[in-house]
Amino acid sequence: MDGLIDFFVGSLFFKKYQKSVIKHPHYYALQKMSPAADTRKPPSWLNSSFFEKTLSKPLNEPLLKVAIKNMVPAVAVGDNYVSILFRATLQLTRTPTSSPENFSVICKTLPQGDAIQNLIKETKIFEKEAKVLMDILPEINRLLKRVELNHTPLSAECYYFGTDPEEVLLMQDLKEEEFQILDR
């Protein structure tokens, strides 16, 4: 019976939400867009200097030097509507005397186009996702780790969220942990 009630309440919520989305001023512009296929090339600001600035604090490495070995799209065309994902393979040098090491990170950036960018900024999608990834899930993981000996984290670690020069999330690349995206 509870499942039926949950389904009914969920259906009502979806219908209410669906109507508000259709009324959103950017809805029809978004309908005409192809899934985030507008660019497969990383933005120019996604460079070594950016990675040094944004990763030194979460990695606790104030002298961090970064060289980009490779940067490619992280998912197939059409897998994302509200972001462009890049997989960056970086070479990190933590101190002037340390050996370089490989490090992979997922960079989630805004898609091109005023309509989608305005919608993302108005709804604060990236900001909300960053809050969940940087504050809420780490706390849940911390609590679960106290009661589960072999706890597997519920999400990728989020290293950085910022809005300068544009909204971007830097996250742990779970492919390095042998996670895979399943076919739809």
Image: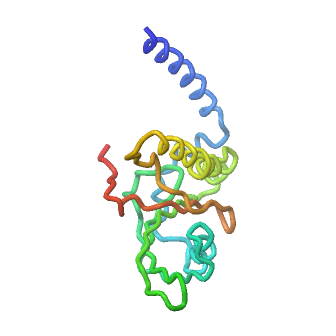
Q: Position of residue 44 (x, y in %)?
A: 57, 76
Q: Identify which residue, 103 or 63, lies in the foreground.
A: 63
Disc tally is 0
Q: Position of residue 105 (x, y in %)?
A: 47, 66
Left or right, 119 with reference to 43: right
Q: Identify which residue, 129 or 144, lies in the foreground.
A: 144
Q: Identify which residue, 107 or 76, lies in the foreground.
A: 107
Left or right, 62 with reference to 149: right
The residue shown at (51%, 45%) is: 141
Query: In which image quadrant can residue 173 be found?
Result: bottom left
Q: Position of residue 40 (x, y in %)?
A: 45, 66
Task: Kindly give the residue lying farthest to the bottom in the view shown.
Answer: 97
Q: Quadrant of the N terminus?
A: top left
Q: Quadrant of the C terminus?
A: top left
The residue shown at (46%, 12%) is: 2
The residue shown at (37%, 47%) is: 150
Left or right, 148 with reference to 9: left
Query: In which image quadrant can residue 3 be found?
Result: top left
Task: Kindly give the residue lying farthest to the top in the view shown.
Answer: 1
Q: Is residue 34 above or below residue 89?
A: above
Q: How is the image coloured?
A: rainbow
Query: In which image quadrant can residue 179 be found?
Result: bottom left
The residue shown at (56%, 62%) is: 159
Q: Position of residue 21 (x, y in %)?
A: 60, 34
